Amino acid sequence: MELIHKNLPALIVVLPLCMGLLTSIIGRRGLGWWMAMATTGAVFAMSGQLLWNVMHDGAYQITYQMGSWPAPFGIVYIVDPLNASVLMVVSTIAAVLTLYARKSVASEIQKNRLHFFYALWLFCTTGLLGITITGDAFNLYVLLEISSLSTYTLVALGRARNRRALTAAINYLVLGSIGANFYLLGIAYLYQVTGSLNMADIHHILVNQVFPTWGGDAPQYRTTVIVGFAFMAVGLSLKLALFPLHGWLPNAYTYSPSAVSGLLASTATKVGAYAFIRVIFTIVGVDFAFGLLHTDTALMVSAGAAIIIGAWLALKQTNLKKMLAYSSIGQIGYITLGFSLNNVNGLTASIIHLFNHALTKGSMFMALGVVVYRLGNARITDVRGLGRQLPVTMGVFVVGGLGLIGVPLTAGFISKWYLVTGAIQAGRYEMAAVVLVGSILALMYVWRVVEQIYFGKRDENAPKLREAPLTMLVPMVLLAAASIYFGIDARATSWVSQTAAELLLGVKL
Amino acid sequence: MKDNVLMRVAARWNMPFLIIFALYTQTHGELGPGGGFQAGVMIAAAFIVYGMVFGAADMQRIVPRWLTDILAALGVLIYAGTGIYCLTQGYAFLDYTAIIPSNPGGAEPWGMVSVEWGVGITVASVMMTIFNEITEGTLPGQEHESHDTEMVGKA
Amino acid sequence: MQIVLDYYNYWICIILMMVGFYGVIAKTNLIKKALSLSLFQTGVLVFYISIGKVDGGTGPVLDEANADAVYSNPLPHALMLTAIVVGVATLAVAMAIIVNIRERYGTIDERDIEDIEHQTEE
């Protein structure tokens, strides 16, 4: 027990990796699901423990040296409140979705490929957890590619239902690889200047040795650092689908298997946003990114555009999965807007919204997954009048929808509250207005569906549908209930997020 | 290419040398230039050259597909297993000191050797899998399915 | 002219990257696209490897006879070994998906695929 406790940061990445490999060997005949379920359950418990440990640690930091090599030389895994909470998001969603995946995936993928599906599922989780926990910039790239490569394949597995999954996957692959390579190139520039790959060490060298020379006559490596940061920023923006680099997202979400849509929407882009926050706040520092380069203005413009245009495009979709995909682009806008405000409230909004949006979007994609499971498609005409036949599923969808709008007593309200407060505090009244307009647009696209669900009339001769099986209902209801619970009692989430934000901005310590 | 004497002889006679050199590279990986990546690719190259000349079916007679699938995972498991062994001995993940605690310097090569073997096995089998995939034109383990069976969620 | 010769390694990697990037954007054949992506990545690899070179440095194998020997930095090479593997894996996944596209659409040209997708309802 002591052993596990001491090695938690390593185990949280190594365990899903090993189990994924084992699943690909012996996971046939339904065993794969059990292995995936056990693993994600264990990872959930471990990340809960890590979050607890780090929040009750005086320095708010747990460091783990891989192979006992000390910091700038070896790879270190560093846990602080920020990535502990992102770990929590990833592992919660992974565990809940694995439970959900059993029936849903079995109906969408051939039987003889199921063990590969669960192996890839675990690899994807491995990558996402690894990106979150690592303190090494190059290690982040490798884990980014592990998660991305398994995601491309998972998206392509949607081909059994619709062949467009394949074109969506290749599109995602091309853009995702370009993004990753940009990030890699950015690291090269910073490595050239600092000779280090450790995030904290890069920051230390930049702040103490490089930036002070910029004020004088002979600024050192000025262009190199700026170009490096620019490459990293563009690469990660592609990964997190920040407007206008979101082109890969809608189709990838729409045509992948339902469980994969849920996982992608609630974790993959979130982890991308986390990596972006790390690059800005931990690697290059706020003074450089926001003070010198005014990246915050650029980010705010694209975030604002994402919020408005994402919601506007969501309003025009007839395929509900695609509608949620466009709405995700808008939600990514909220997250980006939060940290570009550069104050505690804004950053808290970003971090808390990572969690809240994962709950909301995860449950909504799961509800649509049930519709796909029963009807084979999720167009807006398919859900017409389903309010009576699938009361629980549609209830979950509506709760999620309220969360997207940001109605009080749902988790979405808490994030928007922090966001608007942060925007006003930063003197950005126009951004606060954008958030409100975005909410109104969200109300419109959610209402459009709700109207069909409860007031639309189902065809007379359409078959009667039964409610979803229990293994699909339970996870869905759990997430929806959690999103309401954290909307009423946000003490825990805001405590963690606020601590993380204060640490990033250096207010605490 | 099977009918061409030159190709046939070249493929047959190159195989043992390629494999020997690969094993040499593999076993010298821990303290000198070499290692699992290069060795794995070379071993795979030996089989792939054979497969290119005599056809993938002949190659799969020697190295069946289920074997490459298992070996690919097994190699990474050897790697991670080494790390986990160190971890169970009370050291950090992949801290090779755990192998011979009294002599950390002597333990280092042993740890690296086992890790390199894991890497070598995985790289070799993954390379062969890629070759198999490209010649057969399907994703892993999948037989040719008929084209118009769009599977739809059951009502 | 001097600026070209002094920084020839950067020029090579910029040219490689841009050729690849152009291919990714302009080619409609998916296989060509995937290969361009690979070329793009090669540009990044060359960049890393060239920054590892130290002027007058030898290979980074300890030379005990010569105490003050200058060594090149081996770390970028080790990093790029990993990146090459990632690149190969990306290419393999891309190829597998393209093969599947060929089976289901009967073509690997992006414009043809787009036409087919426009004709059929989702």
Image: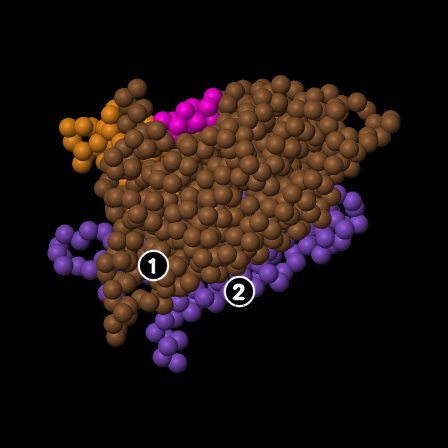
Q: Helix, strand, or loop for circle 2?
A: helix
Q: Position of residue A109 (x, y in %)?
A: 65, 30
- Which quarter of the figure has residue C13? bottom left
- Residue at 51% x, 28% y is A485
**Chain under numbered label 1:** A
- The relative height of residue C66 versus residue B40 in the rendered view (above or below) is below
What kind of residue is marked 1? Answer: Asp
Give the chain letter for orange.
B
Q: Quadrant of the N terminus of chain C?
A: bottom left
What kind of residue is marked 2? Answer: Val
- The relative height of residue A125 versus residue C96 in the rendered view (above or below) is above
- The relative height of residue A234 versus residue A221 in the rendered view (above or below) is above
Instruction: Give the crowd class for mark 2: few <14, some 14-19, many >=20 residues within 10 Å.
Output: some
**Frontmost residue, C81 versus A293:** A293
- Residue at 43% x, 60% y is A295
Tell me if I can see residue A236 in this picture: no
**Chain under numbered label 2:** C
Q: Which residues are magenta?
A: A38-49
Task: Please identify the dominant SS of the magenta region.
Answer: helix
Does A169 appear in magenta?
no
- Residue at 70% x, 30% y is A371
Give the chain letter for brown.
A
Does A48 appear in magenta?
yes
Taking A447 as reference, is B84 left or right? Answer: left
Taking A485 as reference, is A68 left or right? Answer: left
